Image: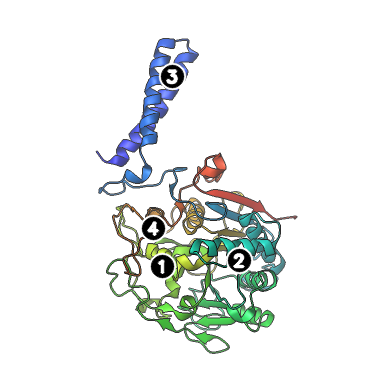
Amino acid sequence: MSGFVIYLLTLVGTIAAFRKARLSFRHLNYRNGVLFLLLASAGSFLFLSQRSENTFASSPAEWVILPNQPAGESKGINPGRVVWVHDPLVATWDGKTGNWWDENVVSQKESDKMLDRSLTALTGEKNLKNAWHSLFSYFNENLGRKDNNYKPDQKIAVKINTNNTYSHRDSEEINATPQLVLSLLKSLVNEAGVPQKNITIFDASRFITDNIFDKCHAAFPDVVFVDNVGGDGRVKSTYADNAIPYSKDNGKLATGLATCAVEADYLINMALLKGHVGQGVTLCGKNYYGVTSIYNDWRKNAHNNFNPDRTGKPQYLTFVDFMAHKDLGAKTMLFLIDGIYGSKLVNGVPAPKWQMPPFNNDWACSLLASQDPVAIDAVGLDFLRSEWPDAPDMAFSDQYLIEAALADNPPSGTKYDPQRNNGTVKSLGVMEHWNNAGEKKYSRNLGRIDGIELIHETLSGK
């Protein structure tokens, strides 16, 4: 019998024994009550003595993360914290008229407020300058840098998701929200004090479309924009060859990394909240794929070891290498998920509207922020799979997060070493699922000392 089955039987048996004890005492049957209480106590000891990360074996689908059973090591100033800012006023598109990014349907003011609040809530600081200082200090201290402050000559690269673009012309399909990209630039320049020329907005695999470039370039003309082809004010991406050889043979997967990321001192990963065929979801983990030396035509690229096993059997997964690499996940100081709209499918216009509370047949109008790369994707995944459990390939879409949380001893047995330098990869963050879609509570929300803490902020009327 597998360790996971024993784990589940112990849990179920312990709960049943406690219930029997309570019923016996209620009916004044003290003898049985004491007996069941002893059994429950023994079961509790056995259950707690089993480390959940050691309960996997080799049979399919036996390694899963149960609600409020965290695995891995929480990261961040406030460990495991994910901030979810919800502002119903930020997006009011009717789904038919004009474009989803038009100024009259996406509020720049509300977008700015969402980003500002996410940063102060994430760090626990009262103002944005202190919030950015805390983010830089925490990141630099963890890298062992002597000076924890941001220095004016240091470079920041922001990886956005413009996957559904085909030229510099605007695409009607879901991509990074222009207003949110501008909000981030405002905050970096005006609050963090980063010189414009030291900021790069990029998607090395696709195109920076006019709706993003024109808006942001007009406000911050010295910011650098890098995409796959360059021209029209954009810079064509170059690559560092063989920068990511991967932990295992990854077939024809590209091994070059965008120079703007390799040369940056800091990365910010601004992903999208949406489903994706094959992997189930596309969040911060997959967003790094757009840093590699791939073609802007997705058909010409390999996608090795992206998809989880269809039966849930643990296996090596490429996203963990992205998250562990020194020039990708290890260089990322802030993780953001753009959920201004959110979408069930990887491509097409944003659709459909969200039904779960508090969205109630409206757009998600949300922004997620964290310093923990595993925790933020875990929260994004819980939103997507709860809203659209029938989305393509949603089953076992959490497998890369389980591998990442337990990267030093993953269920697959893989030795993750994305640079092939005999390095040691430790836990990349904390993974768990919320208790239910109604309450959306993780372990720290329930008063426990480990796991994810979801901070929910609603901005309407504030």
Q: Earlier in the sequence, mark 2 or mark 4?
A: 2
Query: Helix or strand or loop: what does disc 2 sit on?
Result: loop
Q: Is residue 131 left or right of residue 242?
A: right
Q: Earlier in the sequence, mark 2 or mark 3?
A: 3
Q: Earlier in the sequence, mark 1 or mark 3?
A: 3
Query: Helix or strand or loop: what does disc 3 sit on?
Result: helix
Tag 2 and tag 4, C-beta contact below 8 Å: no
**Looking at the picture, which amino acid does disc 2 mark?**
Gly
Q: Quadrant of the C terminus?
A: bottom right
* Residue that mark 1 sits on: 325
Q: Position of residue 419 (x, y in %)?
A: 35, 70
- Discs 2/3, front: 3
Alpha carbon distance from label 4 to label 1: 15 Å
Judge whether 84 appears above or below 299 on screen. above
Q: Is residue 303 left or right of residue 172?
A: left
* Residue that mark 3 sits on: 21
What is the count of numbered marks? Answer: 4
* Residue that mark 2 sits on: 95
Tag 1 and tag 3, C-beta contact below 8 Å: no
Query: Helix or strand or loop: what does disc 1 sit on?
Result: loop
* Residue that mark 4 sits on: 400
Q: Earlier in the sequence, mark 3 or mark 4?
A: 3
- Is the residue marked by circle 1 packed among few (<14), some (14-19), or many (20+) residues within 10 Å? many
In the rendered image, which quarter is residue 77 located in? Answer: bottom right
Alpha carbon distance from label 3 to label 4: 40 Å
**Looking at the picture, which amino acid does disc 1 mark?**
His
- Discs 2/1, front: 1
Alpha carbon distance from label 1 to label 3: 51 Å
**Looking at the picture, which amino acid does disc 3 mark?**
Ala
Q: Position of residue 249 (x, y in %)?
A: 27, 69
Label of residue 193 in the image: none
